[in-house]
Image (cartoon, rainbow, N blue to C red):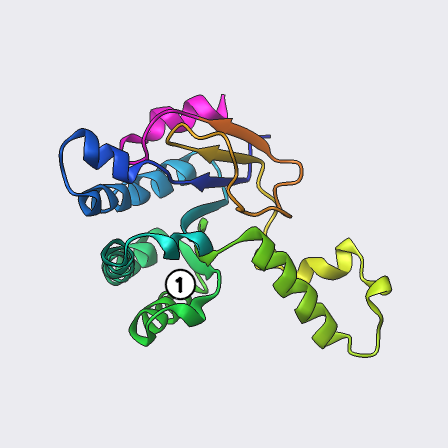
Amino acid sequence: MGPRHIAIIMDGNGRWAKNRHLPRTLGHVKGAKVVRPLVKACTERGITHLTLFAFSTENWRRPPEEVSTLMGLFGQYLEKEVSDMQKQGVRFRLIGDRSAFAQGLQDLIAHAELSTAHNQGIHLTVAANYGGQWDILNATREWQRANPLKGLELLDAPGLAPHLSMAGAPDPDLLIRTGGESRISNFLLWQCAYTELYFTDALWPDFNAAMLDDALA
């Protein structure tokens, strides 16, 4: 049986642009265009869950104009792609602390989630303002709120699982990172405990179905 869940750290947009003497923002624009064909390729290969690391809690340290461009791009992506997700039966959700986003972007995220909630196709999860440590700490607090009379010594892994941001999804079978770095950068730390790791030098805007097949092989 092939993998059900693939997680991807989409790295290398800035370097892709720099190699072409283009502004970094154009790298992010090109990188966003990879997502739709990738979702299609995953669907064709029987993958039921695709989780993409778009923006980490650490990314706020980037130059302000780059951060605002990323946020604007994310909003445009959601506005453009929701109708296509509907047609393809894609179920969208966002994991991460969305309270830091502008209200307009929060509304777009909520709309995308609500309007695709009943779709039966691939689950596309985007991690934005997400960190694995944040996820575990947040889940621990949620567990404590749900069990105010229990001491933390009663908390176990099955008890924590429903409070994690990926609750209900199978853990990733495969984690792919593009861009040549060999680390998981605080992505899905709990969920990737037994995940196969695949690192490629390919920059994210160049990633395609053939490269996906290489990783699967």
> Residue visible at 43% across and 47% down?
53
Within 10 Å of disc 1 (Cα), the crowding (few <14, some 14-19, many 20+) is many
Give the x, y percent position of residue 157: 76, 54
Type of amino acid under label 1: Thr
Name the foreground residue: 192 vs 125: 192
Query: Magenta residues, as a range?
Result: 200-217
Q: Quadrant of residue 106?
A: bottom left
Q: Quadrant of residue 109?
A: bottom left
Give the x, y percent position of residue 143: 71, 69
Name the foreground residue: 78 vs 185: 185
> Residue visible at 51% across and 34% down?
183
Give the x, y percent position of residue 145: 70, 76
Name the foreground residue: 37 vs 161: 161
Query: Is residue 14 visible to the viewer in this orientation of the structure?
Result: yes
Left or right: residue 104 versus residue 116 is left
> Residue visible at 23% across and 60% down?
76
Query: Is residue 126 visible to the viewer in this orientation of the structure?
Result: no
- Which residue is tagged 1? 116
